[in-house]
Amino acid sequence: MRARNSRARRLNATAMLCAAFAGLSTTAAQAATDEEIVLCTIDDTTGNLAAMSTPKTWGYALAVEEINEAGGIVVDGVQKMVKHVQYDGQSDVGRYGQLTQQCIFEDEADVVMAGYTGAEREAARVEAVRNETIFWHNNQGEGGIADRYSFFSGPTPEQQVLPALEWMIDEFGPRMTFIGADYNFCRAIGAWVRTAAGLYEGDLVMEEYFPFDVNQWQQTIGEIQNIGPDFQVHCLVGGDQVQFYPQADAAGLKTPAWSNVTIADGYEHKIFPAPQLENMHVPPGYIEDVPGENSEAFAAKIRERHPDAPYVNEHAAFGYVAVKAMAKAWAAAGTTETEAVIEALEAGVTVEEAPGGSWSLVGDQHHAALPTYLFKVEADHSLSLISELGVTEPSFLSDIGVDVREFGSGDGETYLPTDNPAWADFFAE
Amino acid sequence: MDAFTQIFGFAFQYLDSAAYLILAALGLSIIFGMMGVINMAHGELMMIGAYITAFCMYGGIPAPIAILLAGVGAGIAGMILERLIIRHFYKQLLSSLVVTWGLSMFISQVFLIMFGPNMPSLPTPFSDIKILVGGEVGFALVGAEGFARVTGETGRMPPGVESFGIYRLVMFAVAVLMVVAVWLLLRKTEFGARARATMDNPTMANALGISTPRIYAYTFGLGSALAGIAGGLFALTSAITPYFGAAYTARAFITVVVGGAAGVINGLVASVAALGGVQTILSNLFSVYIGFVGMIAAAFLILLVMPTGISGYMEKLRGRSR
């Protein structure tokens, strides 16, 4: 009898705890009222990827603060504030789909912005698009995604790989080697590198992909030394692959390298001891070292709010830009109704105060025209601006005849350089 | 590329591969090979060693002392783990697998929460000293000035010349010293005799007055300390993250299993020689990826022919010939 009593008591206690948690979670995720515009963002603020992604949330928060301080946005005849709901993806791809659903169904998001890695982005994007909600991805990506509801604020390979490699080939010579992580993003970058080699008379003499947990690089270093290229191209991702840099430094491999996955996301020049990254060239759309009023003002505002920030990276800038772009679209459309907002976006939106320089969304591409910069890491790990690569209009999709405005719901496609018939020769081997 | 450069490159990679496997596996060969405990948190013990090394060096302590402290720290951590958790699962292989796997996740997440995803990296020692092979140089050991002279204005190697950092060779030398030290400890000291006796026949050892719980604790501590030292050595040439250890655990297990438990040190040496050799040959003939996959395939084949590992097979042969 005593046993039954204590068991019953335990069950009661458990039931009460469950009810309490249920209550907490429903009050925590309050359904948005009609009095606010809901921006729902999902980023890794804890876990392995937190160092790169957390600054994006600072960018979002700053943009929302500025919009609300200026009085909000007039939609449906009413002055509404932007409400920023933020979720932590915990560096776990599995959470992104579920959190996106939460954004859409519980928070009634008017727009969802999510993901750092391509895998996280796709997990979230697929959910958003399926539920016909506007989705933004706000860091560099492999480009080439054409979809009615998806928009991209960050630089793409045609704005980084192409102009930067043109400069590198011009400066150092045509022979280049490519080493990268074996997954879809670096494979796409490899295809763009091959395109650049074709377009600018470069010569890709080595192209090798490695699983993520390769961390002994002596052999590859020896191979590269034997080839003696004019410069190297890297797409090394993850804690094991970046061990290439100390090993290459110790082995004395000094050939200049170019990488678009280094510095802009993870500010490695602050983490690796000098001079391991000396002679690395990077093509960000924004980093704190970008010159100009916009950049300085932006970096100052971020540092004011986050004095311990190690570096203001590309994510912070493009998170900010995306929210500002949506604000303009909502204001232009005068409503948060999805189809009207998409129309407003596709009519073209410009954010002049973008930290990297004036940014414009190109309506038929859903990608933006933005300036990119070429930086070089010096021996003491300071960054020097070598070249302003200028503004590259995104034309990859339009060159292959894709006009995203013609896409209906569910029509999304992803295109790679191999889909451009004009470049078929570069891939024929 | 002339023959000498090729041979040297090959030899260097072989020693590099061997150093990697020895360092990753030595601690585990004590814990798994001798004690029979499946410790999935082996990589995390290495990670603890790496973090201790990092913090010591940030504080200005020179690398060799920092690494020794890492060994001590990891050893103590191992002994605490043994006392609190591992001790309860000695006869239960599958349970110890699950429990230590959970420990591995727990420890790496705790470090992630406490210290964040990234620590500033440590400079690689001796990075100014390089070996230059081939071309017009032939063979030379150079410092920073010599290197600058050879590379000249372009900053590039002259054609046919390859350069190698010596830290990986230092790691190999340290690994060999560690193996010899452990062998001497197990063969020539009283502790070693007691430990081997306990692992062979714990009941008899107990009856003879050996305190088996204490031997287990110290042996586990020894294995952990070796893992910690290995972690410290790797920390000087790697990024230091909470997931640092994950890359080593699998390869350590493969090396130890292929080596076999019959003669822990002999097995380890034979296993490293075989697997390292396969990896070096294949990655030179084909690609780094094939080298990696081939090493695992070789382990598979060896175990097919010698299920108790190389040392187990050797013992069987010796037994038959008597």
Image: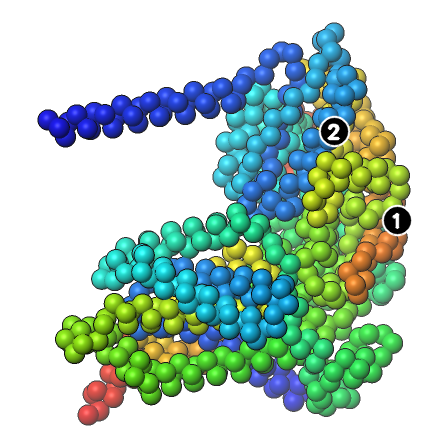
Question: Extreme bottom residue here?
Answer: B322
Question: Extreme left residue here?
Answer: A1
Image quadrant occupied by the N terminus of chain B: bottom right
Dot 2 and dot 1 residues touching (CB under 8 Å): no
Say which quarter of the image contains residue A80: top right
Kind of element beneath mark 2 = helix
**Residue at x 56% of width, y 25% of height:** A103
The residue indicated by pointer 1 is A388
**Residue at x 62% of width, y 11% of height:** A34
Q: Is residue B156 left or right of residue B258?
A: right
Residue placed most toward the observer, B201 or A278: B201
The residue indicated by pointer 2 is A63
Residue placed most toward the observer, A169 or B242: B242
Q: Position of residue B203 (x, y in %)?
A: 16, 72
Whether B55 is drawn above or below B314: the answer is above
Q: Position of residue A18 (x, y in %)?
A: 36, 25
Q: Position of residue B279 (x, y in %)?
A: 50, 74
Identity, as a three-letter code, of the amino acid under mark 2: Ala
The chain that hosts pointer 2 is: A
Identity, as a three-letter code, of the amino acid under mark 1: Glu
Same subunit, labels 2 and 1: the answer reads yes
Kind of element beneath mark 1 = strand
Whether B180 is drawn above or below B225: the answer is below
